[in-house]
């Protein structure tokens, strides 16, 4: 489903060359909930940007569902980001003066769905992620962190993406709310057969995933996950 082949990203700053991603290869099957662990500055966000087509690798291939996104022209990359990928961020990245529901409807507008379709799907998704109906019309800047992250996940699901990339999704949440969000992502991954890749330094989150990778010095290694946490 997701295949990463010998991906390298090189940044040049003055005379220095930095390789936060240095020859990474791994495969994640569809419907897998996976985590990439690593310290701050270990290149986790760089790797996520490459997988989400927000940045291009210096060399190597990123293949999603049989499509080599590393070789796509810019116009196709825009469509890929819109239709095939859902993003969840630590800071939620919601539009503050729009309601929860309007935030979820937005990606569907770019995909060309009618207003009626957008409205009913957004309401359905918000219920699915556990946001009470009386909160759907509340402005994003009036939501608690846990609620805002639920809206962010609903928005990521809006266009039925093949892959959801989550960058420190529990980073701004207290432990209890963070656990609820992890459980929500895990159940969505298994019930909707969506591949979800979470970048985190939260060991509690990583312990609940199907597969766990560690990124250090530009290299990725897989670590065992205790079976008790699966499904």
Image (cartoon, helix red, strand yellow):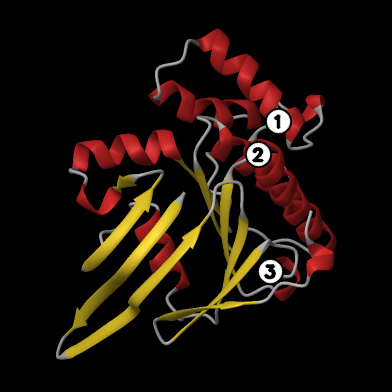
Q: Earlier in the sequence, mark 3 or mark 1?
A: 1
Q: Which residue is mark 1?
A: 126
- Categorize mark 1 by other alpha carbons within 10 Å: few (<14), some (14-19), many (20+): many
* Alpha carbon distance from label 3 to label 1: 25 Å
Q: Secondary structure at mark 2?
A: helix
Q: For the point 54% across and 53% down, which residue is it?
A: 29
* Quarter assignment of residue 177: bottom right
Q: Secondary structure at mark 3?
A: helix
Describe residue 186's horizontal placement relative to residue 29 as left or right. right
**In this rendering, the label closer to the viewer, 3 or 2:** 3
Q: As rendered, which of 30 and 102 lies closer to the eye?
A: 30
Q: Can residue 96 be seen?
A: no
| Vertical relation: 138 (above or below) 169 | above
Q: Which residue is mark 3?
A: 206
| Vertical relation: 116 (above or below) 51 | above
| Vertical relation: 175 (above or below) 63 | below
- Categorize mark 3 by other alpha carbons within 10 Å: few (<14), some (14-19), many (20+): many
Describe residue 115's horizontal placement relative to residue 66 as left or right. right
Q: Earlier in the sequence, mark 1 or mark 2?
A: 1
Q: As rendered, which of 133 and 114 lies closer to the eye?
A: 114
Describe residue 129's horizontal placement relative to residue 19 as left or right. right
Q: Which residue is mark 2?
A: 151
**In this rendering, the label closer to the viewer, 3 or 1:** 3
Labelled disc at residue 219? none
């Amino acid at each position: 489903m997701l295949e990463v082949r010998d991906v390298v990203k090189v940044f040049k700053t003055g005379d220095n060359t930095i390789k936060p991603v240095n020859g990474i290869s791994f495969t994640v099957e569809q419907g897998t909930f996976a985590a990439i662990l690593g310290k701050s500055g270990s290149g986790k966000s760089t790797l996520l940007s490459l997988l989400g087509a927000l940045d291009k690798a210096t060399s190597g291939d990123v293949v999603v569902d049989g499509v080599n996104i590393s070789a796509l022209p810019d116009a196709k990359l825009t469509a890929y980001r819109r239709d095939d990928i859902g993003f969840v961020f630590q800071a939620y990245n919601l539009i503050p003066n729009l309601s929860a529901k309007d935030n979820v409807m937005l990606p569907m507008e770019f995909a060309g769905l009618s207003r009626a379709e957008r409205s009913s799907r957004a309401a359905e998704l918000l219920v699915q992620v556990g946001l009470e109906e009386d909160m759907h019309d509340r402005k994003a800047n009036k939501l608690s962190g846990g609620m805002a992250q639920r809206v962010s996940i609903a928005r990521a699901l809006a266009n039925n993406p093949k892959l959801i990339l989550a960058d420190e999704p529990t980073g701004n949440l207290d432990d209890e709310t963070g656990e609820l969000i992890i459980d929500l992502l895990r159940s969505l991954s298994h019930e909707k057969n969506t591949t979800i890749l979470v970048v985190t330094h939260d060991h509690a989150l990583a312990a609940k995933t199907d597969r766990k990778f560690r990124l250090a010095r530009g290299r990725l290694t897989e670590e065992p996950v205790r079976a008790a946490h699966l499904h």
